[in-house]
């Protein structure tokens, strides 16, 4: 599989050639009727480190299938580790998923993706709300608490005189 090949590639030029070779195939798979094909396509975006496909990931976040939303979130989280802008570009969608997705796993994954974004006050407030809610899912509340704490720390560190 292409994604497995991509995982073993360290040369950026070789990875770019692989991305070019599978570009159309990836787009077609993301439009497939079978949710499994779409999920694989969304997951491959992260494995291929395909930053040019953030709009494709946005579609994945809005997919009807929880598996597709989860795969898109995995890729988004992977791509955003070094580039907060990837998360910042879809922040409102991540807020919706974290707050109201019917699938608890998707909600947790959205919360975890938010940790790689900029420490916006609205995100911290949302996460604190989830932390203090009467949500039955303790894992969800715990993830929200950890991410909110991490974002508050980022916020403090960015202020003049912060603890750098």
Image: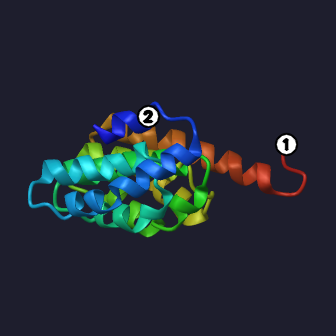
Badge 2 vs badge 1, beta-carbon distance below 8 Å: no
Count the labels in the image.
2
What's the residue at 50%, 52% (across, down)? 16
Q: Secondary structure at mark 2?
A: helix
Q: Residue at x 29, y 57 (%)?
A: 26
- Out of 53 and 81, give the one closest to the viewer: 53
* Residue labelled with disc 2: 7
- Relative to 98, is 159 on the left or the right? right
Q: Quadrant of residue 54?
A: bottom left
* Crowding near the residue tagged with mark 2, few <14, some 14–19, many ≥20 C-alpha atoms within 10 Å: some
Residue depicted at 45% across the width and 44% down the height: 112
Q: Position of residue 2 (x, y in %)?
A: 32, 41
State which quadrant residue 95 falls in: bottom left
Q: Looking at the image, can residue 56 be seen?
A: yes
**Residue 29 x %, y %:** 21, 57
**Does residue 113 show up?**
no
Q: Which mark is residue 164?
A: 1
Percent coordinates x, y for residue 78 in the rendering: 48, 44
Mark 2 vs mark 1, CA separation in Å: 34 Å
For this orientation, the residue located farthest to the left is: 33
């Amino acid at each position: 599989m292409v994604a497995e090949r991509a995982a073993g590639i360290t040369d950026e030029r070789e990875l770019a050639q692989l991305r070019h070779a599978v570009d159309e195939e990836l787009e077609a798979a993301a439009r497939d009727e079978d949710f499994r094909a779409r999920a694989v396509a969304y997951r491959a975006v992260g494995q291929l480190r395909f930053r040019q496909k953030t709009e494709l990931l946005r579609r994945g976040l809005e997919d009807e299938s929880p598996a597709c939303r989860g795969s898109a979130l995995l890729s988004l989280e992977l791509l955003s580790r070094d580039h907060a802008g990837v998360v910042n570009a879809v922040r409102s969608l991540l807020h919706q998923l974290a707050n109201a997705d019917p699938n608890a796993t998707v909600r947790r994954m959205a919360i975890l993706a938010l940790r790689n974004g900029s420490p916006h006050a609205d995100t911290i407030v949302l996460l604190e709300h989830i932390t203090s809610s009467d949500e039955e899912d303790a894992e969800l509340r715990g993830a929200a608490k950890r991410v909110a704490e991490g974002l508050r720390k980022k916020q403090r560190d960015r202020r003049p005189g912060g603890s750098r």
